[in-house]
Amino acid sequence: MFTGIIEEIGSVKETGQTSLAISAIKITADVALGDSISVNGACLTVIDIGRSSFSVEIMPETRRLTNIGNLRVGEKVNLERALPAQGRIGGHFVQGHVDDTGKAASLVHEAGAIIASIACSGEVLRYIVKKGFVAINGVSLTVINCDQAQFSVSLVGYTLKNTTMGLLKQGQVVNLEVDIMAKYIEKFYHPNKQEGIINLLNQYDYLKAR
């Protein structure tokens, strides 16, 4: 589990068919074999550790569903270690399970920030709501608008400086993960069944007037 608060920008050191080596300093300080690291929002397992680099394993499914397989040597990536049990959640719960990729449709400068519009599939957009959470390349962001073809987020100065979002270009492919709570609500909510979430909330008096 992650939070979408990027700890470090790493650099791709080496690419392979089933592995990826990344240069980093902060992340490697206490990383251990078998640890989970979020690389551009994809949860990957550490299989080797160097003095200032680490390697992760890449599965075929990861190549199909993310932009990891398109990374080139020297390219920058967002890195985050798994959330410790006592850690603070500065962003939102991010699993590192990328739902799909999208493309940066437009980047508009606005008073020190950049409004990024991301075009994506309907399978992703069904879970996107205004003021809701979304993870883009592992970065926890708030949706400021959405329609049937795309959604937009505001990239503030800190985010532009401390994540790869500051390097984002129009047309670039990005990893997307929607808020897991939206999926659970959809799963539980069946209007014609007694186990629907509304009935469940009523059962425990959560909908009664206080």
Image (cartoon, helix red, strand yellow):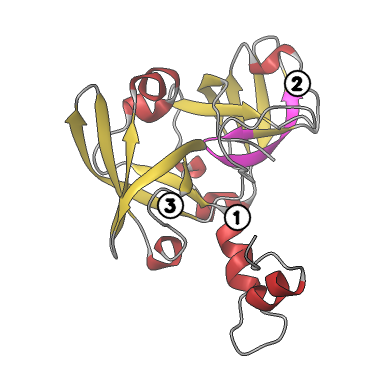
Element type at marker 2?
loop
| Image quadrant occupied by the N terminus | top right
Frontmost of labels 2 and 1 is 1
Figure label count: 3
Left or right, 25 with respect to 147, comes to right
Q: Is residue 143 magenta?
A: no
The amino acid type, in three-letter code, at marker 1 is Ile
Left or right, 106 with respect to 50, comes to left
Image location (x, y in percent) of residue 175: 46, 45
Q: Which residue is mark 1?
A: 180
- For image coordinates 69% across by 64% down, the residue present is 206
Q: Which residues, given as a range, are shown in magenta?
A: 38-48
Residues at circles 2 and 1 in contact by the CB criterion of under 8 Å: no
Which circle marks residue 17 in the picture?
none
First of labels 2, 1 by sequence position = 2
Q: Is residue 43 magenta?
A: yes
First of labels 3, 1 by sequence position = 3
3D distance between C-alphas at marks 3 and 1: 16 Å
- For image coordinates 64% across by 46% down, the residue present is 95
- For image coordinates 57% across by 27% down, the residue present is 79
Which circle marks residue 101 in the picture?
3
The amino acid type, in three-letter code, at marker 3 is Thr
Q: Which residue is mark 2?
A: 31
Frontmost of labels 3 and 1 is 1
Specify the farthest residue to the bottom: 192
